[in-house]
């Protein structure tokens, strides 16, 4: 290994140099101040957790994207978070346990075993809010409006296309297609990764009516 190769970073891992770091930090401060003004409380989930906790519930879909390490103190498997959202849900359900709606926000880096797209980063910087304890449309609207204000802070308010989806619609369509368990699992994984090319290949291999496809 020559000296130049010694300083190479792994694929999907990059440094954040001063100009970009300053822009990120300024946006972080403004966004968190905005969230606080809407009643959202800041939390810092841990960078690593025991694997069974990290991949519990909604986090189980992140298993393939999670770096796994062995805890030198206990010998148990641990994982580095690939996404902070399941961690924040755990904080609400098991640490706070409030009986009223809870508004939480967070901002930090995650680590993925593979990028979500070709040439993408494996160190996403995650900024977000979660509203727990309210199932009505008002809470959905609140989060969408807050997302719009966040994008406006980032200067992207005139370049946004918003796609809305619902897992209930997906489940109903899958049930109507009469797929076996293995095919359903494959399809769910494709949708979670938003892998459109793989979806086309999957549909080509299934004897589905055109409307269902």
Image (cartoon, rainbow, N blue to C red):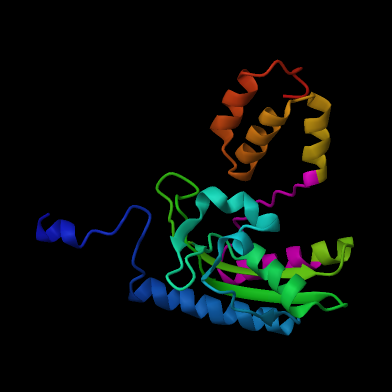
How many tags in the picture?
0
Residue drawn at 67 percent across, 39 percent down:
188
Q: Where in the figure is residue 73, as x and y percent of width and height?
A: 45, 73
**Residue that sits furthest to the left in the current view:** 2
Residue drawn at 63 percent across, 44 percent down:
192
Res 155 seen here: yes
User: What stretch of residues is rendered in magenta?
Assistant: 142-167
Residue 6 is drawn in which quadrant?
bottom left
Instruction: Indicate whether 126 appears above or below 198.
Output: below
Instruction: Indicate whether 44 appears above or below 85.
Output: below
Res 157 seen here: no
The image quadrant where one finds the C terminus is top right
**Residue that sits furthest to the front in the current view:** 74
Residue 179 is drawn in which quadrant?
top right
Instruction: Indicate whether 16 appears above or below 177.
Output: below
Q: Where in the figure is residue 189, as x and y percent of width and height?
A: 62, 40
- Horizontal placement of 134 versus 189: left or right? right
- Horizontal placement of 69 versus 3: left or right? right
The image quadrant where one finds the N terminus is bottom left
Q: Magenta span has 20?
A: no
Q: Where in the figure is residue 37, as x and y percent of width and height?
A: 72, 84
- Horizontal placement of 110 versus 153: left or right? left
- The residue closer to the viewer here, 4 or 211, is 4
Q: Where in the figure is residue 186, as x and y percent of width and height?
A: 63, 33
Residue 35 is drawn in which quadrant?
bottom right
Instruction: Indicate whether 180 appears above or below 109.
Output: above
Q: Magenta span has 155?
A: yes
């Amino acid at each position: 290994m020559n000296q130049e190769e010694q300083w190479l970073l792994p694929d999907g891992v990059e440094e954040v140099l001063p100009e970009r770091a300053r822009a990120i930090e300024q946006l972080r401060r403004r966004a968190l101040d905005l969230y606080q003004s809407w009643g959202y409380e800041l939390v810092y989930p841990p960078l690593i957790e025991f694997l069974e906790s990290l991949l519990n519930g909604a986090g189980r879909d992140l298993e393939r994207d999670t770096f796994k390490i062995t805890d030198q103190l206990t010998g148990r498997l641990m994982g580095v978070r690939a996404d902070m959202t399941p961690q924040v849900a755990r904080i609400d359900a098991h640490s706070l346990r409030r009986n009223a709606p809870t508004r939480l926000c967070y901002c930090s880096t995650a680590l993925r075993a593979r990028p979500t797209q070709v040439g993408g980063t494996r160190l996403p910087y995650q900024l977000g809010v979660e509203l727990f304890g309210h199932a009505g449309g008002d809470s959905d609207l609140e989060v969408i409006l807050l997302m719009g204000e966040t994008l406006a802070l980032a200067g992207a308010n005139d370049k946004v296309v918003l796609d809305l989806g619902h897992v209930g619609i997906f489940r109903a369509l899958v049930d109507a297609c009469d797929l076996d368990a293995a095919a359903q699992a494959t399809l769910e994984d494709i949708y979670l990764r938003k892998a459109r090319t793989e979806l086309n290949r999957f549909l080509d291999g299934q004897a589905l009516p055109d409307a269902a496809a």
